[in-house]
Amino acid sequence: MPESIIVIGVVGSRLHGLPAARLQEIADAAIVVGAARFQQEVQALNPRFVAIAPRLQDTLASLDLSRGAVVLASGDPGFFGTTRLLGELFGTDRLRVHPGPSSVAVAFARLGLPWDDAVVVSAHGRPLDAAIAAAGASAKVAYLLSPDNTASRLAGALRDLGRGGDTMVVAEHLGDEDERITVATVEEICQASFDPLAVAIILAVGTEPVPPRKRISFGASEQRFVHRNAMITKAELRSVILSKLHLPPAGRLLDIGAGSGSVGIEAALLSPALEVIAIDKDPEAIAQVGENASAFGVAVTIAAGEAEALIPTYAPFDRAFVGGGGIDVLRLTMRHCSSGGVVVASYASMDRAATAASLLGELVQISVSRGVRLPDGGVRLQAENPTFVAWGSLP
């Protein structure tokens, strides 16, 4: 039966912090596999060291590990580390894992901050906008960076999303003598250079940390929004509209005739990297959008004025919801929407809905009846006004 593969997590490039038992395992191993930075110290204990080149999987495939091995990993190998790969290659029953503190844990420790309320995102092997979108709406995010997604590139993307004033921490060479912790604004980090394998922590300005949970629900109750005279897109209708928008992970969405802003705000919750612009000519509605966005903890750009003047200003955009303004506003929206973008519009009148369907291609009527409790404890159905939703992709 093949011998065990021992996985040892190391903080930094030095072995001096490992317990004596781990150092003995390194000394006794048939083969020690690790990054080249470990070579000098390992060979003082065991000459049978193999440096990873260029990938761990390729290196392991070239070796006979039937007599066992020690694999040196960074920090906690079970946290975005080598444990997954080794388990897939050799089976978890062969592994004996001795984790060290993860780089994220060390980075937060250097700041004296807890991180049980942080979202942790790996930026290895995925597009940067997808990594940003994966962070959700958390006010405290740690990114494991890569040569493709560096600290300055991440900062530039966050700045373009309006987060230039947030605090950004870049932790380099954690556990080594040249360890460096840089604390600045996102805007300032854009202009600096850092080790490509650093850890970045983003702390939003003026917000409290939130639990690391992913939002998968939508259609929030109208009672959660400030609105006037029931002038709000009802929860059930809003759910259909959001589904027809096919929200991308990033880009720009216009909420035209925003009213309370409920559609745009829920879009921002579902796609945190999406830039949302709420347009309305009513000053009271504009104030409500701001109050609701703040209550839900999302960033929404609020534009006060006539839709005809503002729509071209924010072109091109990838998604648009037309909740007011009539057919002329819909036509203008379609002219300025990006190719491949999606426009959704809602109407109470059948004639406008039919025209919108001829322009966009798709149409559905939403009729909702809500249960209302009777004095005797029974339930009756109370119908809401039916609404038409038209939608389509732009050529």
Image: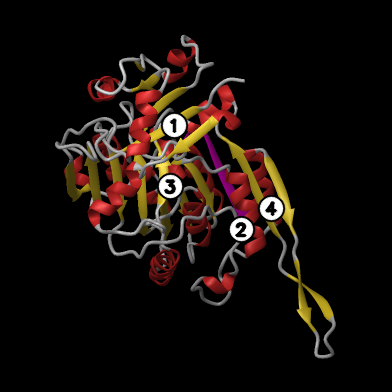
Is disc 4 surrounded by few (<14), some (14 to 19) or many (20+) residues within 10 Å? few
Q: Are marks 4 and 2 in contact (CB under 8 Å)?
A: no
Q: Is residue 91 left or right of residue 117?
A: right
Q: Which residue is mark 3?
A: 135
Q: Is residue 4 above or below residue 381?
A: above
| Residue 270 screen position, x and y as percent | 52, 51
At horizontal 46% and vertical 60% (from top left) the residue drawn is 211
In the image, which disc is placed on residue 238? 2
At horizontal 25% and vertical 24% (from top left) the residue drawn is 37
Residue stretch rendered in magenta on the structure: 336-346
Q: Which residue is mark 4?
A: 351
Under mark 3, the amino acid is Ala
Q: Which residue is mark 1?
A: 7
Is disc 3 surrounded by few (<14), some (14 to 19) or many (20+) residues within 10 Å? many
Tell me which label, 1 or 3, sits earlier in the chain. 1
| Residue 204 screen position, x and y as percent | 31, 56
Q: Secondary structure at mark 2?
A: helix
Q: Secondary structure at mark 3?
A: loop
Q: Is residue 315 above or below residue 213?
A: above
Under mark 2, the amino acid is Arg
Tell me which label, 3 or 4, sits earlier in the chain. 3
CA gap, disc 2 and disc 1: 50 Å
